[in-house]
Image: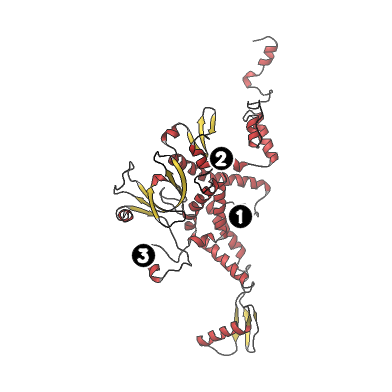
Amino acid sequence: MISKLFEKRETTVTVEENKNEESSYSNVEAAMLKAFGIDAKGYADESALKEATYFTCIKILAESVAKIPCYLTQETAEGDERAESEPLYEKVALRPNPYMTAIDFWKAIEVNRHHTGHGCALIERNHRDEVLNLWPIRLHRLIIDDAGLCKSKMVNPVMVEFSSVGSNDMEYCRYEDILHLKSFTQDGLNAKPNRYMVKSVVNTGLKSQKYLNELYGSGLTNKAVVQLTSDMREEKNLKKMQQKFERIFSSSGRIFTVPAGYTISPLNISLSDAQFEQVRRMTISQIASSFGIKMYQLNDLKDTNNNSLEQQQLSFLVDTLLILFEGNEQELNWKLLSPEQRRKGLKFRFNTNVMLRTTAEAQANILTKYVSAGIYTPNEARRMTQYKAKPGADELIVNSGVLKINDIGKEDDKKNGNT
């Protein structure tokens, strides 16, 4: 009843859903779907993931976000420190719910974000409004209550229609009870996945992949034409002759024994003549650029050397991932923390330093400079290299030969008895 009530009186924002090309819909079902604006034979959810480049890009983004730990931190006068005593600390950093690690949780959220446009998690709270668990969900609709049916302080509160993991049953909750991470959005609320925006490019990749599969399946042999010396024009007779060749004169569809009066002519269009490699590489590049993925991450090292690789890795962090981390942090801080907790200086932060790890030699050089410049204490540097702290190594140290400009000459004056 509640779904019908909301459908009639509220503005709804429907998540884009397109069915699989190979789905078995009857003509009546297809017509009904078309009436509701859904193309039953159009671009497909599942077939898109079968495109190698598209799948790889989503996998790279999901794993890149998931491998960066997210901690609840506390602002102090000495700087930010981890708030390990807070109940939410382990909930986000270690186990969002009893069945998922933090890595599994963020991978699921990011895959849904980039594949469906919406990465969502239901916030389960107890009667004291404390967060108990975070559950990945599949968003179906956002229902904007402009009829005033929901009691809320918001001008137009938003209801969410979703389904839980492993269930097709529709459930409803308030918008403030979900974490909502969006892909490409034009209105700040509804979002569209990349595959929707670059639909034709992904379809081209699927077709090229299908062509290669069929070519390898036929033993790298293309189709052939059978030329007759007789004048046979009736379609029925031509089909009989084609079936006869396939049944009698061919061996596994590859070797033909041609009787007298017939000539076999291959229909060969080579991959080089069709510029298959160039077209395929352009398709891969277009899909990768829509996700912000660098070509070296797709094993294309044609324009990459050792000097540019480090810069591309840094560019991937700055240009692609930082906006995802910042958006995730803002959503976590707003939905999981109370105004009082935020005023106390609690906030969630992704530790992006994990991505900046380098070789042992470069790391030693960097840490040595930080310690000698008085930025890190020796124990802080030891912790970064997974070594235990040492007594007396918690104070900052500097080179004794370094002085402030205003202090130059003061030591000589003290030695000479001048003040």
Residue 121 coordinates in the image, percent (x, y): 45, 48
Q: Residue at x 45, y 51 (%)?
A: 137
Quick one: SS at disc 2?
Answer: loop
The answer to which of marks 1 and 2 sits earlier in the sequence is 1
Quick one: SS at disc 3?
Answer: helix
Residue 58 coordinates in the image, percent (x, y): 54, 54
Residue 326 coordinates in the image, percent (x, y): 50, 42
Question: Circles 1 and 2: CB distance less than 8 Å?
Answer: no
Q: Residue at x 61, y 71 (%)?
A: 217
Direction from residue 308 to residue 207 in the image, left or right? left
The answer to which of marks 2 and 3 sits earlier in the sequence is 3
Q: Residue at x 39, y 53 (%)?
A: 171
**Which amino acid is tagged 2?**
Asn
Residue located beneath label 1 in the image: 298
| Residue 351: assigned label | 2
The quadrant in which the N terminus is found is bottom left
